[in-house]
Image: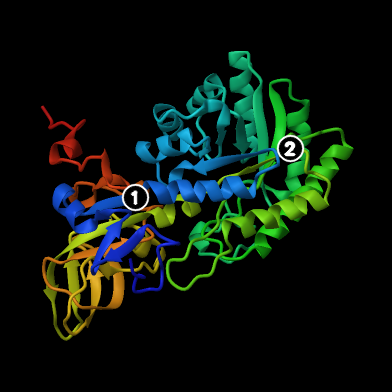
């Protein structure tokens, strides 16, 4: 096994080269493309479980619960792996709760986040007896109380508090700015906790925050922990004792030259603050998503053709913005590399898809030695790839497979055109 061109090695990724060909664990990616077609998402079972185990080891010896953020990758195969490993789940919709149940997850290990939970979703989660609702507004607190009263139940709640911390990430995925739609304002949190504590239909059990995604430093997290613990201390003085502290997720991964903290460093930054403030007895919840599945996946795509001209060189591939939205949505930089290396002079290409949008690009100005028909791989696409996929331009969504050593499991077949039209009808 040899290192990958960008310096990653087999101790960091399951995607390595054997005899010049990119493999996942012990399976040639070229064989997977021939068997399942392209575009194709490929995930490594080992990489997913290794990342989860890093969180588990970092939290060893203290009351804790790892709640995987389902939105990062909601495939039933991925969820079932984590459920069997003992994971809890962070959900943001009734649909995600249904997925967790279908994958064998336990409702009593589920926290429900999100700014716009409907009354039907609140009722469904209450009936399922989830662990906690992360309440994000005054109106949600009122709605939840009303639904709980109707059902004759007490709803377990924590408030998602906005600590007003700049996490230093892209504005679309920064969730703790003062202007953010997420959570309740820090200044309003105490009043809402008092109201929830006095409500016979509610049971206050925790506090929650989540400051953003793809965070590459621990300082904003440390600041958020301190801000929340100030509230916890104040609540305790008023006789409101919390069972758990939930500091969300957001730990970034290396797409290019980022140097995010390790999982151990990230958890350590949180636990040191908690212990120093005398709250080690409380259960610590974390909600990792990208850091568990991001580096466990690649997107395979085939070069349809090469187009050159005065305006630049384009490698037109069969994956598009509907398959991988991050570059078009965030301007995100994604690694692109040939599955099989060629001995020919490289040329600089923009990697673009077939969709009728100028924003349909996957990578810009990449030096590649490729021919028409070659396979390309985009590492780091295990998170927010298929979870954000669409059928725009009536394109069939990709298949997904999980590799387990030498075995391959198709955990989502490719859409058919008939799938796209299911549920539609022509006028009589």
Q: Is residue 262 left or right of residue 337?
A: right
Q: Considering only vertical position in the picture, is 268 above or below 396?
A: below
Q: Is residue 163 visible?
A: no
Quadrant assignment, res 327: bottom left
**Closest to the observer, 123 or 69:** 69
Q: Residues within 10 Å of mark 2 (few under 14, many from 20)?
A: some
**In the drawing, what numbered circle is on residue 192?**
2
Question: Which residue is label 1 attached to?
Answer: 43
* Residue sitting farthest toward the top: 152
Q: Is residue 369 left or right of residue 330?
A: left
- In the rendered image, residue 221, in percent from the top left (x then y), is placed at 66, 58
- In the rendered image, residue 347, in percent from the top left (x then y), is placed at 21, 82
Could you tell me which residue is drawn at 29 percent across and 53 percent down?
26
Could you tell me which residue is drawn at 30 percent across and 68 percent down?
336
Could you tell me which residue is drawn at 39 percent across and 53 percent down?
296
Quadrant of the snapshot with the N terminus: bottom left
Q: Residues within 10 Å of mark 1 (few under 14, many from 20)?
A: many
């Amino acid at each position: 096994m040899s290192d990958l061109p960008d310096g990653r090695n087999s101790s960091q990724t399951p995607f390595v080269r054997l005899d010049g060909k990119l493999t996942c664990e012990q399976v040639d990616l070229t064989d997977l493309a021939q068997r399942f077609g392209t575009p194709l998402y490929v995930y490594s079972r080992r990489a997913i479980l290794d990342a989860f185990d890093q969180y588990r080891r970092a939290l060893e010896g203290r009351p804790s619960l790892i709640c995987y953020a389902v939105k990062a990758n909601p495939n039933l195969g991925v969820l079932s792996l984590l459920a069997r490993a003992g994971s809890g789940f962070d959900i943001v919709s009734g649909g995600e709760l249904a997925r967790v149940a279908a994958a064998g997850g336990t409702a009593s290990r589920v926290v429900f986040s999100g700014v716009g939970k409907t009354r039907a979703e609140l009722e469904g989660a209450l009936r399922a007896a989830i662990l906690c609702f992360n309440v994000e507004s005054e109106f949600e607190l009122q709605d939840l109380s009303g639904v709980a009263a109707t059902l004759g139940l007490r709803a377990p709640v924590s408030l998602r508090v906005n600590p007003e911390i700049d996490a230093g990430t892209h504005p679309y995925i920064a969730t703790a700015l003062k202007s953010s739609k997420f959570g309740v304002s820090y200044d309003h949190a105490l009043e809402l906790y008092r109201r929830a504590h006095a409500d016979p239909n509610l049971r206050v059990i925790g506090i929650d925050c989540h400051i953003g995604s793809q965070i590459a430093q621990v300082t904003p997290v440390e600041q958020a922990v301190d801000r929340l613990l100030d509230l916890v201390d104040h609540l305790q003085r008023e006789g409101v004792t919390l069972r758990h502290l939930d500091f969300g997720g957001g730990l970034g991964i290396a797409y290019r030259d980022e140097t995010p903290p390790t999982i151990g460093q990230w958890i350590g930054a949180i636990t040191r603050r908690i212990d120093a403030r005398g709250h080690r007895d409380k259960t610590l919840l974390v909600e990792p998503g990208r850091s568990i599945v991001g580096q466990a996946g690649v997107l395979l795509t085939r070069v349809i053709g090469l187009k050159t001209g005065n305006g630049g060189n384009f490698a037109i591939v069969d994956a598009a913005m509907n398959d991988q939205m991050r570059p078009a949505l965030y301007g995100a930089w994604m690694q692109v590399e040939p599955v099989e290396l060629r001995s020919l002079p490289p040329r600089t290409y923009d990697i673009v898809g077939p969709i009728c949008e100028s924003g349909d690009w996957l990578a810009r100005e990449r030096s590649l030695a490729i021919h028409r028909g070659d396979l390309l791989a985009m590492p780091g696409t295990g998170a927010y790839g298929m979870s954000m996929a669409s059928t725009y331009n009536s394109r069939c969504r990709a298949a997904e497979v999980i590799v387990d050593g030498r075995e391959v499991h198709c955990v989502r077949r490719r859409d058919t055109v008939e799938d796209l039209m299911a549920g539609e009808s022509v006028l009589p």
